Amino acid sequence: MLIENVWTSAKAYLLAQRKESTILVISSHVDEALLCDLTYFSNRLLLDFPSWETLPEEEITPNADIVGKRLEILSRLKTHEPKIVLTSLQGALQPVPQDVVMHTWRVDDELNFDALPQMLTDLGYHRTPLVSDKGQFAIRGGIIDIFPVHTMQPYRLEFFGDEIDEIRTFDPSAQTSTGKVQSCEITPACEAQITSLLLDYLPKDTLIVFDDLAALEDHLVLLKNYSIDPLFGKYPHLYLTPQSITDLSPNAKTHFEIFGKTIPIQREPHKLQRCDINLYDVPQSMQITFVCANASEERAIKTHYPKMKAEFKTGNLSSGLIAGNHIIYPYSEISKRPAQRRTKWRTSYHTPPAEFHELAIGDLVVHFHNGVGKYLGIETRPDHTGTQNDFLIIEYSSNSKLYVPLSQAHLVSRYIGAREEHPPLDTLGTKKWHTARTRAQKAIVGYARDMLELQAQRELLGSEPYPPDSDEMQLFEAAFPYTPTDDQLSAIHAIKSDMMSNKAMDRLVCGDVGFGKTEVALRAAFVAAMSGKQVAVIAPTTLLARQHFKTFEERFSGWPLKVRHLSRLVGAREASETRAGLTDGSVDVVVGTHALLAKSIEFKRLGLLVVDEEQRFGVK
């Protein structure tokens, strides 16, 4: 089946009408809007099959998330439920493992415990002292920790002999359990024996859809000239030739062709039209369905069209269409902001960089009771009961060694000093470290006293409270293309509570790179700016400031807010206009570097200051 000259929502509508059990859509790239629209129109299993983001010649291991997603999808393709598979041209060109087996282990199952290490190794997992990342497993006594490449949390399996007694999920950073489950699924950790094709996993009656064949052919030329063709000789097993995908077209079962602008109406009874209409002029005979992401969007439409008889459905749709006498009209057509499929914001599976199991041999560490020593690694040895256990080895002065069991690893941390030179190693059995620690604790108490006095002065100043959430705020939050994590929602709720109080807010939001801190700041900034206050966002570097400016400008587009940028990347004239706008109040949000702290900057009604990566602004 060929799809040409049809807008995205119409493609999704037509694909959803197909009767075939399995549909494979091949495009030059996976369209997020098509995924969004298919989610609305079809109740089939929707699988987005990714391609590797690396080339063999780069000698870089493919991203574990991508490998895990590919293997999970390949295993799910064996099920008989109706499904739509979307993939890019690269995804269709790259061969896949001949057979992907999903192992399901349940509580009370019996497995050969002694054979499990070799089994997991054969599946591509690496044995490590502690599990901290995807594709790893660890064994301690009768416990096996394993981090499948397709899951967001690792599993801890406790055995009684060869029987699985309990399965728990755990946090790899703290190595503590987070919950109990009754089963877990284990896929291979890497793609080995890649001698098959994606098509080999699909039924013979699969409908193959070529989305915009002209773009596919153009993309084939690019792949041949710039990336894939030179690899055929060196890596013939890693890619199909461009001709292979072209050969699929005459062999595939072509059901019909769609050329949206050329098929006469009388010959195409199900011809679709765009929603280029005035809703006030819709005939009574037409049925209207409004597609809204949430109740706020539904209320906004009812306010705009109070007398219109229409059906409301919950969902996201990139654009509207007219099918016969049925008008499907999404809120995005009114707001002019694109709808996106809401996906789960990824959860960190990396442990903090300062954790002991990421230390290099020779790094300095600090034991809470014994002071500064040198990390020598992890060693398995018998403890006082004769049981084999893992120990951290720390060397102190006079070559004395301290063996710390992993159960006490929380007492050990990486040495972080204000000075660049390394301190001398402490001596075991002396009071030197205890004296230094006591002196430091007294200094900390004095510093805390000063901070407490400063905070008391801030609270006495008070603050004008911001109003609670409005419909505009709910619409702004609904435009976020991901499902916020529980931690994000908790931080956002806490910040809103601070802003609605009559006390000055002073809140620290911590999180790894890429885990949603910016969205938290965006929502706080929206509350302040829509309440008539100015917002200043300070970043430590010009590039980061520019990146934040682009993000704020994009998220605030469509709202009556002026966002400006101020750093050395901004020309003198534009910078002067921005400073004037801050003074007269015409600029609502400004994003910049520490230049915003200059004496020449005057705000008319500054209500919120956001400092990104505050630790990089520190002073001695």
Image (spheres, rainbow, N blue to C red):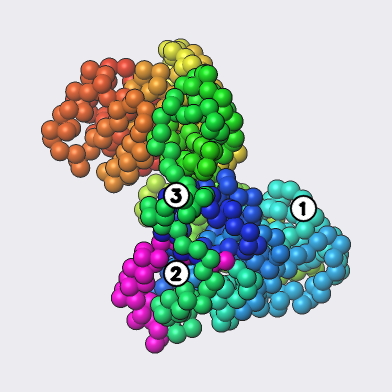
Q: Residue at x 59, y 36 (%)?
A: 314
350 or 69, which is in the foreground? 69
Q: Is residue 232 above or below residue 303?
A: below
Q: Residue tagged by mark 1? A: 181
Q: CA distance from mark 2 to mark 1?
A: 37 Å
Label 3: which secondary element: helix
What residue is shown at x 38% (from left), y 23% (from top)? 529
Residue 277 picture location, percent across and down? 41, 33
User: Which numbered marker is on residue 24?
Assistant: none
The residue tagged 3 is 265
* Disc 3/disc 2 C-alpha distance (Å): 37 Å
Q: Extreme left residue here?
A: 573
Which residue type does callout 2 highlight? Gln
Sequence-first disc among 3 and 2:
2
Residue 87 within the segment the image draws in magenta:
no
Which amino acid does the dot numbered 1 rest on? Answer: Val
Q: Which residue is disc 2 drawn over?
A: 90
Secondary structure type for disc 1: strand
On screen, 412 above or below 444? below
Q: Which one is closest to the eye, mark 3 or mark 2?
A: 3
Which callout, 2 or 1, points to the residue nearer the camera? 2
Q: Quadrant of the C terminus?
A: top left
Quarter residue 190 falls in: bottom right
Percent position of residue 71, x then y: 60, 67
Magenta span covers which residues?
Answer: 207-234
Q: Specify few, some or many for label 2: CA neighbours under 10 Å numbering under 14, 14-19, or 20 or more.
A: many
